[in-house]
């Protein structure tokens, strides 16, 4: 359950309601760290600007975090899960703790339930943290992250990089210039109403649907290095 607190908006001089997320689920590549395609080398891990500050802010606010990452390089045979794990550990170390990391190792055409834009990794992460997925905020750098969040009615904030497509920026419900600004947004501002569409109109996933995702996530994805 999201906690709802009243905060004094000094600029406006008015009491505003803000909703803190139950947890923040981050994408990894291009969001928490610079995107190095199929990186299996911990020495090449470079945090994004303000990532450490953003995580420190969440830690101070007592908000749990997890990371949800597509790593098709595993399914393509380009990197091993052990290498992914080593990269995850390095990122965790550089950022002072990022919580559990859930990875989809499958290739895009595998049809798995965990590869974003499908929401399997988000469901697994929320389940692991013991929070409702719809009460989480998802922060990522591409449309697939936003779509996965929309599929489970989670709040979604896009932090674009130079590689993010303009159409995906235009389609995002909420956009922030960097990670710290994105975290500020979810901690201090109520979520924007999602754009009307099929995902927004759908009710929360049924129990049967959730457990199907959970089972396949347990089978197919792994919490690595967190
Ligand atoms: Mg990314
Ligand atoms: Zn998968």
Image: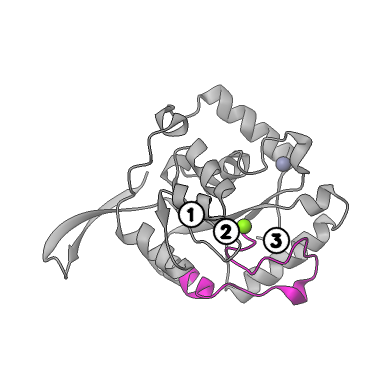
Tag 3 residue: 225
Q: Position of residue 197 (x, y in %)?
A: 42, 32
Mark 1 vs 3, N-terminal side = 1
Left or right of 199 on screen, residue 141:
right
Which quadrant is the C terminus positioned in? bottom right
Q: Are marks 2 and 1 in contact (CB under 8 Å)?
A: yes
Badge 1 vs badge 3, beta-carbon distance below 8 Å: no
Nearer to me, 80 or 77: 77
Name which of mark 2 and mark 3 comes first in the sequence. Answer: 2
Q: Is residue 182 above or below residue 191?
A: below
Task: Please give the name of the residue rendered at 77% of the width and 37% of the height, measured from the top-left corner.
Answer: 109
Q: Position of residue 221 (x, y in %)?
A: 71, 44
> Mark 1 packing: few (<14 Cα in 10 Å), some, or many (20+)?
some
Mark 2 to mark 3 CA distance (whole Å): 27 Å
**Where is residue 99 shown, x and y percent of the image?**
58, 60
Question: Which residue does the numbered mark 2 point to in the structure image?
Answer: 164
- In percent of width and height, residue 46 lies at 66, 75
Could one spot residue 132 in this view of the protein? no
Residues rendered magenta in the picture? 27-55
Q: Tell me which secondary structure the magenta stretch mostly adopts.
A: loop
Query: Pointer 1: what residue?
Result: 169
Q: Residue at coordinates 57% horizontally, 55% vertically from top-left? A: 165
Quadrant location of ligand 2?
A: top right
Looking at this view, name the residue that lies furthest to the right: 77
Closest to the observer, 13 or 193: 193
Q: Quadrant of the N terminus?
A: top left
SS at badge 2: loop
Q: Nearer the viewer, mark 2 or mark 3?
A: 2
Residue 220's disc number: none
Disc 2/disc 1 C-alpha distance (Å): 7 Å
Distance from label 1 to label 3 (Cα)? Answer: 31 Å
């Amino acid at each position: 359950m999201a906690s709802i607190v009243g905060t004094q908006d000094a600029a406006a001089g008015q009491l505003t309601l803000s909703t803190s997320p139950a947890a923040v689920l981050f994408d990894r590549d291009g969001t928490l760290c610079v995107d190095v395609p199929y990186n299996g080398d911990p020495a090449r891990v470079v945090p994004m600007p303000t990532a450490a500050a953003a995580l420190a802010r969440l830690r101070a606010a007592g908000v749990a975090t997890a990371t949800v990452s597509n790593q098709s390089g595993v399914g393509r045979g380009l990197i091993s899960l052990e290498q992914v794990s080593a990269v995850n550990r390095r990122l965790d170390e550089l950022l002072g703790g990022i919580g559990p990391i859930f990875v989809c190792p499958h290739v895009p055409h595998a049809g798995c339930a965990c590869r974003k834009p499908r929401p399997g990794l988000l469901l697994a992460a929320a389940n692991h943290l013991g929070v409702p997925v719809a009460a989480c905020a998802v922060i990522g750098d591409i449309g697939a992250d936003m779509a996965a969040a929309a599929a489970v009615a989670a709040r979604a904030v896009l932090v674009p990089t130079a590689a993010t497509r303009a159409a995906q920026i235009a389609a995002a419900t909420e956009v922030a210039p960097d990670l710290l600004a994105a975290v500020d947004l979810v901690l201090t501002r109520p979520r924007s109403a999602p754009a009307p569409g099929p995902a927004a109109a759908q009710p929360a996933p049924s129990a049967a649907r959730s457990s199907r995702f959970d089972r396949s996530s347990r089978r197919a994805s792994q919490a690595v290095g967190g």
